[in-house]
Image: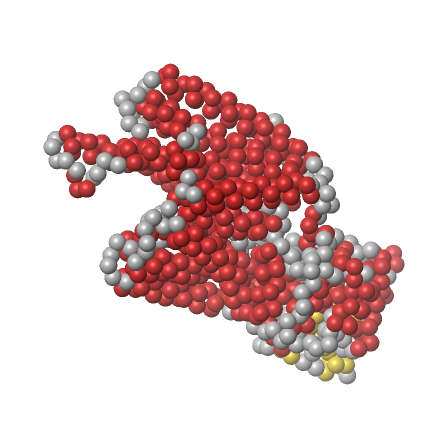
Amino acid sequence: MSRAQVGPLFALRWRMIRSIRVQTGLAVLGVVALALVVLGVIGGAASRLGRETAADIGLGDLGGAIDRTGEVAALLPSAMVAFALLCIVAPLAAGGGQELIPESQLVSFPVRVATLVRIGFLLSPLNIAWYLQVLLLTAATGYAVRGVGGPLPPIGVLVMYLVACTAVGQAIGWGIVGVRRTRTGRRSTWTFLAVAVAVAGWVIATDRGSSLLDRSPTLSVLSAQLQAAALAPSGWVPFVLGALVVTVLGYVAAVRVAEWALRRPGDLGVDGPLSRPVERRAFESGPTAYRMLVQVDRASLWRSPPLRRGLLVLGVLPVAAAALASLPWSSIALLPPLVASGAALLFGVNAMCLDGSGALWIATLPHDPVDVLRSKARVVAEVCALPVVLVLVGAGLRASEPPDLVDLVCALGAAVSCTALVVATAMRLSVMRPHRADLRVPRDTPAPPGTMAVYSARLAVVTTTVGLGFSAATFGRSVLPPLLLTAGLLAWAAYSWTRTRRRWSDPVVRAHVVATVAAG
Amino acid sequence: MTETGGQHAAVDVRGLSVTFAAVHAVDGLDLRVPAGGAVALVGRNGAGKSTTLRVLGGVLPPSAGTVVVSGIDAVREPRRAREVVGYCPDVGGLVPRATPWEHLQLAARLRGMVGWEERARDLLERFDLAGASDRVTAGFSHGMGRRLSVLLAAFHEPAVLLLDEPFDGVDPLGVEATLEEIRLARMRGSAVLVSTHLLGLAVQACEEAVVLRGGKVVAAAPATDLAGDDGAARYRALLS
């Protein structure tokens, strides 16, 4: 039955995209995303083949094409653990799973819980972190896992593992949603989180990370991949069958658990935390209009469950991963851009939606409209800067080597310039492409899933490119290149911000933004 | 203020047009509301009532025409115009994760009000929202949200009070509080414009009714002309 609902809902969502250009763009993006995975596998395999051929004809390490297959293969189980963790965290942060159409718009339709679960499952690739990890794992498998059967059999094993993890992650995500509907459940999850953070801290502090990962259960996945590559069925068939069983059980469990979670009455009333009074803050002595708007925006941010949850994930996971991995500074310079773009995706790409229908009321108050824009930009900047600082400190303290001046300039330059660039981009999108978004329940996103995927891809491409620039600069001996890069990027961000500000000064543009985010 | 026929027009709209792409939401509308007067804007969905109020509220720039509120050209001096206007939008109009008290704080700051707390508490009491003044508005019922929107519009005792569907989904006590606020506003000399589909309440709240159709004024008459079954029949005839 749920299959019969999934198709029409996807069709409706597709028809809701009014612009043919956007529809074409999304279709192209989907094809490109799939092609990148295929190219990753082919590229990985070709790179290895090229190196081996060069060695066979006596050219040795051709152009530095060093044999790293052993290192990459050794890292694969750890990368698989990271993927499994992501599969748990992503639906957890999304309150069970991603939505195709907001729940509030579907209340009059008899949408089954199984449909919601299935849609969440199908939308997993729209999460840029999920997709990038899949890309990384498939390319690494293509490069490092070799056998007479070519790259496809080990990729098949990997796909089974990815699907099984995603299904189990959905079940766990919905389970936590159900558990958190009571006070005891919420306390238990916080306690569990605190214990998990403490254990992770202990593992990092005592340098047990590597030895733990060496005993990771995902070693069996790599083993199955190697057996599949060697076309030895006794090694991979049991794994594939096991993964199939886990997938089916995970999916069935996700549906049952989701039904339980959504039916559970809980103890927070119909509106949950919304029905509880919040502490009244003193009216600061003589704040400017801008400061008052910032206060309201900050409150709107911290009182939104999806934003709180997203910030928590961004503040903990990358920091723990970076600290655990003990990265070199060339890799640390890559982190701020990625974290900043992740933070902007929480709400920054549609920052005006924080005001909801109140945007209409605020527009009638006597104020400089630019204050509203500046206030939103400031809050977006704070949201981006906070996890960036945390990840820099966490990764820096546990870096594999002590930094020199160039390393520090690169890391700080990446942090400052990428935060500025991401904020400027987010504000431009907020003004040019506003969307109505409630951000009321954890499953709410600031824009429809397809749009979020496009925004993720755009931000990822820009920030990864910039991050690679700073990463490359760490290998140099002069601080001039990273300083020049920082200055250039800041100038770019300033130019983009000025254009957005000018656009916002147009009352017609403002009216469009306000009418869109305030639409009831 | 504009002198019209011996009366001061606190709201003076001439030749107002608002176009969205190919749609004429408002098409050459003329409207005057005297200081201390109350006019009901009535008409079918899409007649241009909310759009007109949004222009007067300073949210939407007009495509053509002049809009003067309390003597201030709302198109040329939108910020000054907003100082004298109080606007209750037709949808929500509330910041979802802010409390009523925080709405009042923000309004007071942006309007430069001093010693506003007493009036704020009084209004919260009268609109039966005192008990919910520190709850975020996202948890409010529709009626509570409407009451708060009216309260916020009236908070600074504006010279022009614009109420878009203020009675929609509101309980009888809330309706009474809104009617009382309209009465007090008129006593202060404010001009009141009420857009509503509830003819009975429009008649109670206003002295004049303006019927819109297709973005144009099709009739203007004393509100009492729309009272009762005969009035409703006359109104229906104007809509088709």
Position of B74 relative to A383 (above/below): below
Point out residue A243 in the picture as x, y percentages from the top left corner: 47, 24
* Residue A6 picture quarter: top right
Q: Is residue B64 visible?
A: no
The residue lying toward the viewer, choosing from A436 and A185, is A185
In the picture provided, is B18 more to the left or to the right than A243? right
Horizontal arrangement in the rendering, residue B220 relative to residue A89 (left or right)? right
- The number of numbered badges drawn on the structure is 0
Q: Residue visible at 80% across and 74% down?
A: B186
Q: Nearer the viewer, residue B87 or A261?
A: A261
Q: At which x and y percent is residue B64? A: 58, 70
- Colour convention of the picture: secondary structure
Compared to residue B140, the image places residue A232 above or below, namely above
Is residue A198 at least partly visible in the picture? yes
State the image coordinates of residue B182 (x, y, percent, origin top left).
Answer: 80, 69
Residue sitting at the far top = A234
Instruction: Give the residue at x 55% y 42%.
Output: A195
Q: Quadrant of the N terminus of chain A?
A: top right
The residue located at (60%, 38%) in the rendering is A176
Give me the residue at 65% from left, 79% from top.
Answer: B72
Work out whether residue B180 or residue B18 is closer to the camera in this orientation and state it.
B180
Q: Residue furthest left?
A: A58
Quarter of the image holding residue A294? bottom right
Q: Is residue A62 left or right of residue A356?
A: left
Q: Position of residue B10 (x, y in %)?
A: 72, 77
Front residue of A436 and A335: A335
